[in-house]
Image (cartoon, rainbow, N blue to C red):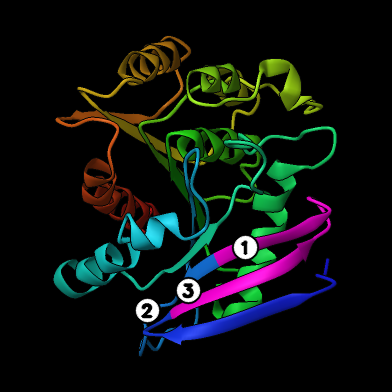
Amino acid sequence: MSFRTFESASIGDGIHHATVKSAALRRRADISFYVPPNVSVEKLPLVILLHGVYGSHWAWLYKGGAHQVLDRLIEEENLPPMMLAMPSDGLWGDGSGYVRHRDADFSRWIVHEVPEAAAQIDARCIDAPRFISGLSMGGYGALRLGLLHPEKFTAISAHSSITDVMQMQGFVEESQAEFDLTDANPLAVLECAKLNSHRPHLRFDCGSEDILIEHNRTLHRDLEAAGITHVYEEFPGGHTWDYWHLHLADTLRFFKACLAL
């Protein structure tokens, strides 16, 4: 696969922005990247971070400070250097859900095209372990796409997630009919988890004051009942960037532990 057009710029300190012509989306789309500067490694594990509704590729950088969390853990906790890829969701409505619509395949954009774009920024991520994470709608995308593509991802870690695309109706203006979904795969995270016996390492968390806490607790109970191995954690906090900035560190520590398995 190759992009018809690929425009990128480095703005310094390891941050890159790119706009590509996506075949999956049939339009241009944006991705932000972070590559820790001055690290000498042969392989650079790739972490795909998915944003929530209303946001775009810049959210994890400039609201979540993801690169700052990564740098701190590299310095203070000997976290292996990793590359961050932070794509837009395709910018459909208030949020695409990272699922396939009739007019654009937002899941293929994330699973197949974003890693290819990352390789054009830094080839060290080619054939390196790959992880996926996200928040809210992006947590749903991470859980669902990671479970649907166990061959692509070593581990999944999600924050404050919706657990079925229908739950987006509490956040977005667009109606269920307007989504015009044509995805052949299950839409509920639980059903995706049941599809394959081989799964990526799985973790998710939610704030105890989060509006989505009961959905996360239900998913945890249902996964336990189905005998599906996972880590679930609750922490104080709500559906806020303060929570996601703080607990991204837990995701990156989990990914580090999975590298050692």
Marked residue nearer the N-terminal end (3 or 2):
2
> What SS does tag 1 mark?
strand
Q: What residue is disc 2 on?
A: 36
Nearer the observer, 60 or 129? 60
Side (left or right) of 41 relative to 114 = left
In the depicted structure, whether residue 222 falls above or below residue 22: above
Q: How much space separates mark 2 and mark 1, taking CA atoms?
A: 20 Å
> What SS does tag 3 mark?
loop
> What SS does tag 2 mark?
loop
Q: Quadrant of residue 218 in the image? A: top left
Start and end of the magenta stretch? 15-31
Q: Residue at x 38, y 30 (%)?
A: 230
In the depicted structure, whether residue 63 falls above or below residue 71: above
Q: Does 24 lie within the magenta span?
A: yes
Q: Residue at x 41, y 27 (%)?
A: 229
Q: What residue is disc 1 on?
A: 30
The answer, for residue 123, to whether it is visible in the render is no
Question: Residue extending furthest front?
Answer: 173
Q: Quadrant of residue 118 in the image? A: bottom right
Where does residue 3 sit, x and y in percent of width and height?
80, 70
What's the residue type where badge 1 is placed?
Answer: Asp
* Magenta stretch: dominant secondary structure: strand
What's the residue type where badge 2 is placed?
Answer: Pro
Nearer the observer, 61 or 116? 61
Q: What residue is disc 3 on?
A: 44
Marked residue nearer the N-terminal end (2 or 1):
1
What's the residue type where badge 3 is placed?
Answer: Leu
